[in-house]
Image: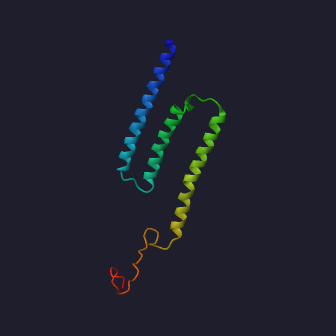
Amino acid sequence: MADSHADISKHVKLYIGVFAALAGLTIVTVLASQVDFSGPGHVVVALLIAGIKATLVAAVFMHLKWERSGWIWWPLVLCAFFFVVLMTLPTLVATESRDRAPAGTWDTIPVREAPAHSGGNAESGH
């Protein structure tokens, strides 16, 4: 019985440590949003912090830290690979589209003019 209590307290300490790390990384995320990064730096920093947080959750709370079976790890590696591909592909396509667009049209929003009204009064129905 004494071994099980020591084992449980060891896991509780680990869970509290991961909670503290997640809380700290959340604060880092908020602080990083206030910093002006150039180009796609905001997305890279946000994905990096989110990846670290997801790794902590998966490793400890989903008990993957203690998993030894290859049946678990190969699908995870495959998912990570396709995640990187799916995040990179739209970036490449958007860059190509921006390069082919006429100058000054990529970053402007077209303004729609209001439709012309007839001379009647809207309240009276005429």
Quarter of the rendering containing residue 25: top left
Q: Residue furthest toward the bottom? A: 119
Residue in the picture at 57% in, 48% down: 83
- The image's colour scheme reads rainbow
In the figure, is residue 69 to the left or right of 19?
Answer: right
Residue 125: image location, x then y, percent: 36, 82
**Which residue corresponds to the image point at 64% horizontal and 38% vertical from the top-left?**
74
Foreground residue among 56 and 98: 56
The residue drawn where x is 38% and y is 37% is 24
In the image, 124 versus 49, the foreground residue is 124
Residue 71, how many percent across, how many down? 66, 35
* In the image: residue 61, left or right of residue 77: left
| Residue 43 image point, x, y percent | 46, 52
Task: Give the quadrant of the C terminus.
Answer: bottom left
Q: Nearer the viewer, residue 9 or 99?
A: 9
Task: Work out whether 88 lies above or below 59.
Answer: below
Q: Which residue lies furthest to the top in this view?
A: 2
